[in-house]
Amino acid sequence: MRFELSDTQQLLQKSAREFLAHEAPIAEVRRIMETETAHDPKLWNKMADQGWMGLLIDEDCCGMALGMVEAAALFEQMGRVLLPGPFHSTVAFAAPLINAAGSEEQKQRYLTSVAEGRMILTAAVAPAITETSGKLTGKALFVPDAAAADVLVLATPQGVFTVVTAKAAGLSIVPLQAYDQTRKLYEVTLDASPAERLEASTAAAVAQAENIATLALTAEMAGGMQRLLELTVAYAKTRKQFDQPIGKFQAVQHMCADMFLWTESTKAAVYYAAYALDQGLPDASTAVSVAKVYAADAYRECGNRAIQVHGGMGFTWECDAHLYYRRAKLSENAHGDSRYHRERIARRIIDRPGTNETAVTGYRRANP
Amino acid sequence: MDLTLSPEQLQFRADLRTWLEANVPPPVPRNSGESLLERFERLKQFQRKLFDAGWAGVAWPKQYGGRGASLIEQVLFLEEMVRAQAPPLANTLGITLIGPTLIHYGTEAQKQRFLRPILSADEIWCQGFSEPDAGSDVAAIRTEARLDGDHFIVNGQKVWNSYGWAAGWCALVVRTDLKAAKHKGLTYLLVDMKSPGIEVRPIRQITGESEFSELFFRDVRVPVENVVGQINQGWEVAIGTLMHERATAGAIFTIRYQRSLEQLIDYTHKTGQNTDPVVRQKIAQAYAELEVFRMNQMRATSRASSGVPGPEGSILKIFWSEYNQRFQQMAQEILGPYGMLEEGSPYAIDGGEWAYGYLRARGNTIEAGTSEIQRNIIGHFVLGLPKSY
């Protein structure tokens, strides 16, 4: 038994860490987040050169076909630097969705372009979008990175569809003014817009892609917490009040200790869930929900403690803590909030076959 | 990442399961009327049975009666014991703390003399660390041992001794150099509880029972050969012991807490609360936290068994103790006023287990190092913040 990254996984993580420290320092992140779409083509191309776009794409589509543990190792580093832009949307959600729901030909057509860095995607679960004779009509809210995407992948009640943004009549993409500027959210409206149905669309395919996207998100969250912890501990060691570093005070120390506990615990949950997905363990989906539920509270509370320890400084635009604080809340809401995931857990651990399945009305994901 | 067990470990677990199925007596409920002494006698008999079958001291060296297996097998053993609802080890302090300390720091003569009777439960051990004025500040110990020829003469008072009333021996930390700095003048002694001058007074706890006791020492003579490690270097030995306590203690909690959660879910089905969305949310939250604890525990075991100590050890204690308090509170909410009923009441749920569980959990964040001390340890030793005291 070894609950630890392998040597090659550690190498991947280390090279990602070094690459991102160089290419996406926080000043650069701040610059990119001020742009219209928070997508930086130069950074995108450099990441594509690393092969990262094909992280979860099959080798016959020019991908690396790595597992979820490797993916978690990479996304943890991206969350740590608050990587802006459509990487998660493309690599962790839309590509796995095409991979799960597309025919061989469709996979080749879309995923090869993605792996080679030539196509940007985003995806959404869109219960309010309907299909009539190959055209989509309806609206989806909170779609990340839609304005940067070449192709939208929409999981509607009638199946999963792709919409090529440049060619789609009746498509409108309007930015929502959400407070995390590193990951922009949009309203996507379609009015009889041309779309292509992915030929192997099933509910199971959508669920599989959602598990991957959720897990990658929790890995980002763990990385964000790690960075908040580092920033906060460093500040507590240098900031002096009453002639001593504030980190000497137990009230401050204990806040840092809590951040450490939440960060390490989230990592344990994330890597277990990644392993469970890779191995196809029976509790894999539940493990993803466990990680998401835990990470949601943990990241938000790390943000709270980080700002509290930074004091007045923490309330300024200049201090980086608020950037993570925003991302924490966005992450909490994305890919199923805690109420959704707790209900998903409840169905597995409380409900028993034949006793009360129909009695539970359940909770639907908040999506218009 | 590889969370599978080796074929040998799987075999170990299968053999253990078979043995436990055949040998574990039916559990005795809280309201059975069994006295504390009767209960302890039952626990001792079961440990003796484990020892005879070769299951006690899984990770101890073979020459001292152990099995010579790794920490993973040790954790499997603890888990399977709880899973089988086996009586807990009578000599739990001896097996989890004092034995490992002797294996690490003891002389060969001490190992030969003391280790086997620990495993067989022939000699029950207690531990004398805390004092009325030395709680979190363990190094403030004032119980004094003065050298007189080939004996120490011990005078002082200890408190919070688990099983003090049942113990034949005590691992005692005493002050042997009054002039040295706080941590420097301490010595770790093995004391025969039958020695003249020792008095044991039970402490009645919040739960009404007396697991713990106070110990009083008046001119108690202890032979010098009962020093573990060097004279005036007892702090190192004692801290080694406490680290052991934190590293292995978590293993029993996962399965015990899983069982309590299952029991509570059964109760929601009996009372129709299983479809109440608020109850469902709370139970799912508890499950998520418990799973995260299980994963932390797995990671800590993995690191400890590969010899690389990780930072997880210090967070496990905070996690299980605070989780259990949250869980017991949730159970009280689901049980409503029935949750208050103790053993003896005809309306008590599960023999009054939940009333006891709620009260007992209150001690979790205090015993074995308070949550505050654990956070100080993380702050200073893990995060490198300046020491606050």
Image (cartoon, coloured by chain):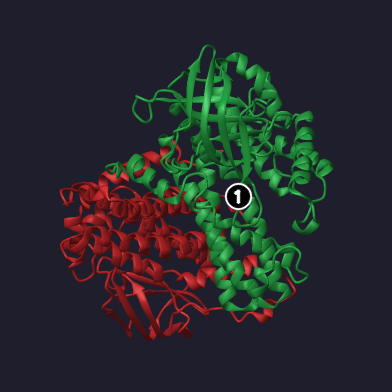
Tag count: 1
Residue A81 image-quadrant placement: bottom left
Answer with left or right where residue B197 lies relative to residue A260: right
- Position above or below: A109 against A266: below
- Residue closer to the observer: B292 or A363: B292
Q: Identify the residue position indicated by label 1 in the image.
A: B253
**Residue in front for this viewpoint, A149 or A20:** A20
Residue at horizontal 50 percent and vertical 56 percent from the top: B322
Residue B211, horizontal then vertical, whole percent: 64, 47
Task: Tell me the quarter of the picture where residue A189 sits.
Answer: bottom left
Quarter of the image for residue B2 reads top right
Extreme right residue here?
B22
Label 1 environment density (alpha carbons within 10 Å; few <14, some 14–19, many ≥20): many
Residue at position x 53%, y 33% in the image = B305
Q: Secondary structure at mark 1?
A: helix
Where's the C terminus of chain A, which quadrant?
A: bottom left
Q: Would residue B30 appear left or right of A154 to someone viewing this image?
A: right
Residue A111 point in image, percent of width and height:
41, 60
The N terminus of chain A appears in which quarter of the rendering? top right
Chain given the colour green: B
Q: Residue A68 location, x and y as percent?
A: 47, 52
Q: Is residue B268 above or below residue B78?
A: below
Q: Amino acid at mark 1?
A: Phe
Q: For mark 1, name the chain.
A: B
Which shade is chain A?
Answer: red
Along the line of sight, the residue nearer the viewer: B78 or A366: B78
Left/right of residue B380 with respect to residue B257 in the rendered view: left
Residue B47 in view of the camera: yes
| Residue A75 visible, this angle | no
Could you tell whether B42 is left or right of A7 in the image?
right
Q: What percent of the width, then of the height, locates residue B269?
A: 71, 73
